[in-house]
Amino acid sequence: MRPFSYERPDDLPSAVQAGSRQGARFIAGGTNLLDLMKVDVERPRHLVDVSRLPLREVKETPERGLSIGALVSNADLATNEHVRRRYPMLALALLNGASAQLRNQATMAGNLLQRTRCSYFYDVSKPCNKRAPGSGCSALEGYNRMHAVLGGSDACIAVHPSDMAVAMTALRAEVEVQGTEAATRKLAVSELHRLPGTTPERDTTLSPGDLITGVVLPPPPAGKQTYRKVRDRASYAFALVSVAAVLDTVDGRVREARLALGGVAHKPWQAADAEAMMAGVVPDKDAFEAAGAIAMKNAAAGKHNRFKVELSRRTIVSTLGELAGTGG
Amino acid sequence: MINLPSVIGRRMLGVAAVVTAVFGRELAAQTSAPQTSAPLPRQESDDDGALAKVRLTVNDQPRDIAVDPRTTLLDALRDHLNLTGTKKGCDHGQCGACTVLVNGVRMNSCLSLAVMRDGDRVVTIEGLADGEELHPMQDAFVRHDGFQCGFCTPGQICSAVGMLAEIQKGVPSMVSADMIGAPRVTPEEIRERMSGNICRCSAYPNIVAAIIDAKESAT
């Protein structure tokens, strides 16, 4: 690990100030950043430890939504009574991620900001546009089984690894950000992460010094919700494909359907066209098949990840079927 | 000196490993070069080479150390405090061998910096027993043969202790049939909740049995 200096500011303004210094990085749980520092992918010159800032609260908002502090651990968030009762897909997504030890340590904001697990991103001996802009993408012609089938570019086909962020996308969460300017700003979680385009080195739309202070969930959507993850082993593995789904039906018709996909793109993928198509239809197998087909119609696969297109489609159909009570 | 439990029979070669694993003490170290409390030589840390002063409460003892900021909690325990019961497996949070309890909660000590744990309470495998009396989880691992080579065992035991506390606290898992109700201690729950601890010898069936036994003997 390369040398760095370390500080633990006492309050938010000094943390943001320190974090905007050249070469500075925030650290809280440390489970992703330290791992990347050990393999020399991340090379911060200065670490700003924000882990003791007072951002650990989970509380109901006046609108009956939920405000979640940036530093709430993944385990505490999954255990929270509001989350378990009113946002079960979020609890499920959290519990499907990582291991129990990591969930105890990792924070909510760190989960959002974790970096891709693309093996070429991790391997400093290989070209990677995300790690070393302009060096090329080893995954395009390499072993790309885990890689993106939606929204990729010629520069990068890495996927975002979070489960939690996929559920938050379906729940239409808002992210609160404190930058060096005075006011806190909010953005939709779907606007936090970005597609790689020609600048895959940027995972998010945040600027240096921007600190996520929390996430606000609107009141839970009507209807049923769940999160399903498909992976190579039963526990402690990243998603091949995951689906966060909401299905609200009234009088035999879909009032609202929401679909967000994980493991398939550089960001949590909101299947907006499929959501729009579902509104008003009879929630049966045909409708779910159509939704799956629409969600994946622009998919582009490489040599080893073609299976993800069909797997995503089937997982969508199956998950919606489970919510409709017509069989998973 | 600890009395060796009588169950160790079929692998006499593994006795040292077993003792280390369950008790967290290095028999070999006691019979060879004496250990000192001096830290290993380390590289300079930052521009002025300053070491960071850190106070930890380790196994109920206050411990003050001066560390390069790069030092993980795992390396601080092993290299600065000579608590070598905690093992370094992958050093990337994937194997769980380095699991310790921090403020009562299980964590991967390889993915935490010692400076970030200043003021925290850490319990390692060395701190579980009450004098010569094994912690019920250690006792259960011995009785159920919950290991073979023993390398993952300190992490398995600390993790299992932390896991039962989580179930007690109502932390759900993804296999909990009902995420609202109190979770139960079943083999399925244990397998899911212990998935962050890898055992290369594949002692899993006996580990699960040991944990269930420890839970039952505690209630």
Image (tube, helix red, strand yellow):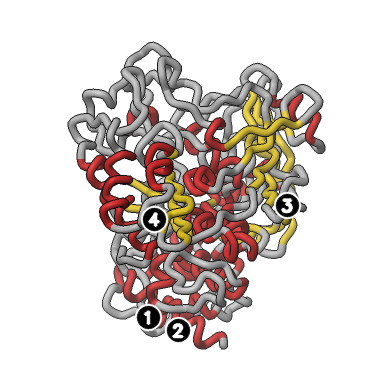
Left or right: A72 as drawn, with respect to B155: right
| Residues at marks 1 and 3, CA–CA distance in whole angstroms | 53 Å
Locate residue B179, reporting x and y percent.
Answer: 52, 70
| Residues at marks 3 and 4, CA–CA distance in whole angstroms | 28 Å
Mark 2 crowd level (few <14, some 14–19, many ≥20, 10 Å Cα): some
| Residues at marks 2 and 1, CA–CA distance in whole angstroms | 9 Å
Q: Which residue is mark 3?
A: A63
Could you say whether the residue bearing mark 4 is in a helix, strand or loop? strand
Q: Nearer the viewer, mark 2 or mark 1?
A: 2
Q: Which residue is mark 2?
A: B213
Q: Which residue is mark 1?
A: B144
- Tally the marks: 4
Q: Are marks 4 and 2 in contact (CB under 8 Å)?
A: no
The residue positioned farthest toward the left in the image shown: A303
Q: Which residue is mark 4?
A: A228
Q: Are marks 2 and 1 in contact (CB under 8 Å)?
A: yes
- Per the rendering, the mark at residue A130 is none
Q: Of residues B56 and A281, which is closer to you in this image?
A: A281
Which residue is pictured at 35% across the width and 18% down the height? A155
Q: Name which residue type carries label 1.
A: His
Mark 3 crowd level (few <14, some 14–19, many ≥20, 10 Å Cα): few
Locate residue A14, reporting x and y percent.
Answer: 80, 29
Q: Name which residue type carries label 2.
A: Asp
